Image: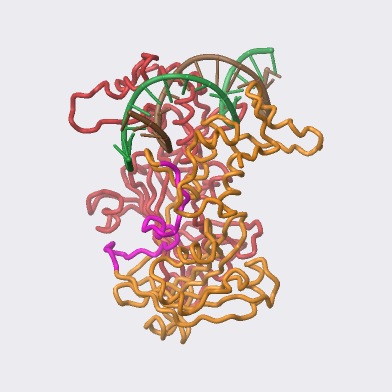
Chain colours: A red, B orange, C green, D brown
Amino acid sequence: MSSIPPNVSSDPASQSAAVPASPSASSPTFSPLYQQIKALIMQRLQSGEWKPGELIPSEVELGNRFKVSQGTVRKAIDELAAENLLVRRQGKGTFVATHHEARSQFRFLRLMPDSDQPQVTDKKVIELKRLRAPAEIARLLGMKSGDSVVYVKRVMAFDGVPTILEELWLPGALFKALTLERLVEYKGPMYGLFETEFGTRMIRATEQIRAASADADAAQLLAVEKSSPLLCVERVSFTYGDKPVEVRRGLYVTNRHHYQNELS
Amino acid sequence: MSSIPPNVSSDPASQSAAVPASPSASSPTFSPLYQQIKALIMQRLQSGEWKPGELIPSEVELGNRFKVSQGTVRKAIDELAAENLLVRRQGKGTFVATHHEARSQFRFLRLMPDSDQPQVTDKKVIELKRLRAPAEIARLLGMKSGDSVVYVKRVMAFDGVPTILEELWLPGALFKALTLERLVEYKGPMYGLFETEFGTRMIRATEQIRAASADADAAQLLAVEKSSPLLCVERVSFTYGDKPVEVRRGLYVTNRHHYQNELS
DNA sequence: CAGTGGTCTAGACCACGAT
DNA sequence: TCGTGGTCTAGACCACTGT
């Protein structure tokens, strides 16, 4: 433990000594101390040494371990908290973020009811199977075309009204043990399941939104007229190291709901 | 100048003295020093004392003015920079953010070409007129139904292809001097015009996105088939103090473009 | 009460940009 | 060379949470 990074000096007199430690190479191999600490913490998260929901060591403890001041650790944790990888709780400590909280649900489901009321959501899995990745999916997941992927198709209903038709593609290697049974019986957010059962934590996603017309299949599953306008949301989710681990294509009925977005 | 806020003490021995300075009231009128400084800076921005694009006083200077340490000013500015109200430039100073930059354009126009290439954009104003605010618009703008608003309708084309049909509603009182001529001749982002000519700076917006079908008018102006699926984006923009100052309804053609969003 | 994160200070040096 | 923001430290006290 207490592995001191090569780039970090324990000489208190010169904090800059931590950086010019390798002045040999021509390239500007420079990084502030707190960024190095941040990277070290992120390593612990990625390796699973500190698991979602767990308490991590205190700031002073980490400062001692890494041989830096508490303020430097603080700045590293500040950024990780801003990125939703850690959660600070005054008086208690700093915890690894988890998808098992109502708080984080709305971060990855932006469809809101027009008249905001709590809703009963109902999820129905239509299909789960293994298949060879189509070229487009393989490209988005950083895999080779034809590699094994898990395919899921499901419908979500709010207050009994079918509203979202979703297709998912997951890397087969990571989700070997995912079965329809396991997915159906699981209560709670899917990313929570991925996190605890498959050690894969989503931390970021990009979405591309378009307008589309319902085809026969979508119209039937969503109980709308054929050619009805639908919101088409294509998402790629990433885990640590910007590694893509999910492609998701959703069709949203936006008669009584809307996709909510904040520009700031 | 150098107006010391009532809540800020200049006693260096007790930073907490800044808060219990008013222990009279029962309510917990508490706020960290840096938040008070942040509020003071925001006042200067809102009042126009520091205008968009301008250099604000240095951190040490502000520290002296407000009788706090540089670190406290720094934390206040950190937050304001994170909210895109200020922009820091190492070696130069801290500047008031402005919409007259390519950087800030993409923040408020999320429609991207599917194959990312620089595009020639062309804006055509269809209509500009004054009218009495419809109930819904008045509600969103925090006005009374029937109050005067400026209405703008325009089409934006990318590489010659009409892609966005937009309607805007602006408070009449704020935009008295806005004419069709002025709007047409103006080159650059509309929010830049609002900022320099009308002293109204947009700092935040919320959007509600739905799928819609093109009606006859939209189909004609966007050169698509009637009933084509379109992205319908309803935006409310806010200035300082969370005051709404614009309602915008856009219809986007998403055949060769998509609405790009980051979930983090 | 002890331990945690949250705030504040004072002083140091670095990297950058303009002069 | 100077002034700016950027980093780092060390130490202090506060507010919150558990025991």
* The one of A170 and B96 positioned closer to us in this rendering: B96
Tell me: A37 left or right of A188. Answer: left
The quadrant of the picture occupied by the N terminus of chain A is top left
Please indicate whether residue A177 sits to the left or right of residue B70 in the image.
Answer: left
Please provide the residue range marked out in magenta. Answer: B93-119
Image coordinates of residue B14 in percent, x first then y, are 66, 23
Residue B226, position in %: x, y?
Answer: 42, 85
Residue B29, located in which quarter of the rendered image?
A: top right
The part of the image, by quadrant, that contains residue A39 is top left
- Corner quadrant of residue A232: bottom left
Q: Report the residue at 59% width, 54% height from top.
A: B47
Q: Is residue B190 visible?
A: yes
Q: Between B124 and A225, which is closer to the camera in this rendering?
A: B124
**How far across and how far down the image is residue B121, in percent?**
33, 71
Q: Nearer the viewer, residue B50 or B85?
A: B50
The spot of residue B171 in percent (x, y) is 61, 70
Query: Who's the residue at 49% across and 82% down the image?
Result: B127
Task: Name the residue: 39% across, 57% down.
Answer: B101
The answer, for residue A168, to whether it is visible in the render is: no
